[in-house]
Amino acid sequence: MNTPTIFLISFLSTLYSFTLSQTPEVGLILPPEEFGSNYQCCIAIPLTGFTLYKEAKSNSIAGCILPTSEKNTRERYNFQTQPTSDGKMIDLKDFHRMSYEISCLKYLEISQGFVKINESYWIKKEELETMGFQLSSWMDFLVKNSGNFLGYYANDPGLNLRRGIGTEYEKILTMKGDEMEISLTGEVKGLWAKVKLKQYKEHPCNQMEAGEPQILNTYEGWAKILDDSGTPNIHYYAGGC
């Protein structure tokens, strides 16, 4: 094998490894851990709100987002943006229901000390941290909470389980439907994660009064848990059964 060929193979291998290790800066703005006990429900925004910026610049203030509360309670069921003359600045689609009680803001990008919430507005990272909020990539959130939810399930039309990292590896099966429960082992490479799979005869929620759910098969392999944009190829049921 001549030197140029060896160099090309080495370069492509390095490029492939680099690509696998990269994940877009997309994720969730998680509230402080004590948030859940202080405020049982539902929108994870501090009482003082967050300042919204039009750009990742301190001089581009556009308004703010604030929680709204039910009368005579400290529970925050919704949110409002100010000014509101030209409609909502933030939409419900900009939130993720992270648990039964709490929905948190998603972020799409981090730049120059600012966090992008949607295509129009940013929040200053320093303000989030001062309030005790933390940024979490989707992968970190999914790995940390694997086992805390009923299970993870593949988004439609399904997700391939493979023997290694990459589409060149043999496909074991396609995971789809609520009968295939996915858990993450914690071993991660870029957009891919090593998973364990339980294939049930019926979804465990349908077996709650019939004893232990029947497991037909178990598998282990690798799956592309995040898509190329950095958002999950799997979901979970925040409200439980």
Image (cartoon, rainbow, N blue to C red):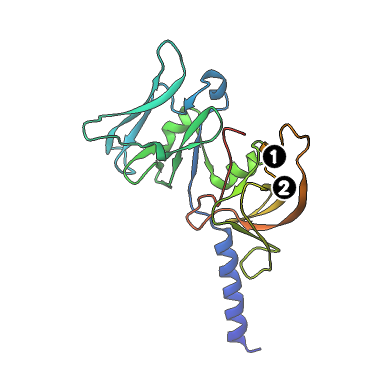
Q: Is residue 105 left or right of residue 52?
A: right
Identify which amino acid the numbered label 2 is placed on. Tyr
- Residue 53 image point, x, y percent: 31, 38
In the displayed structure, 229 sits above or below 13; it is above
Question: Who's the residue at 68% across and 68% down the image?
Answer: 170
Q: Quadrant of the N terminus?
A: bottom right
In front of the other: 32 or 71? 71
User: How many marks overall?
Assistant: 2
The CA distance from mark 2 to mark 1 is 8 Å
- Residue 107 image point, x, y percent: 44, 43
**Which element carries disc 1, helix, strand or loop?**
helix
Question: Who's the residue at 48% across and 26% down the image?
Answer: 42
**Which element carries disc 2, helix, strand or loop?**
strand
Q: Which residue is mark 1?
A: 204
Q: Is residue 70 left or right of residue 142?
A: left
In front of the other: 92 or 185? 92
In front of the other: 153 or 18? 153
Q: Which residue is mark 2?
A: 200
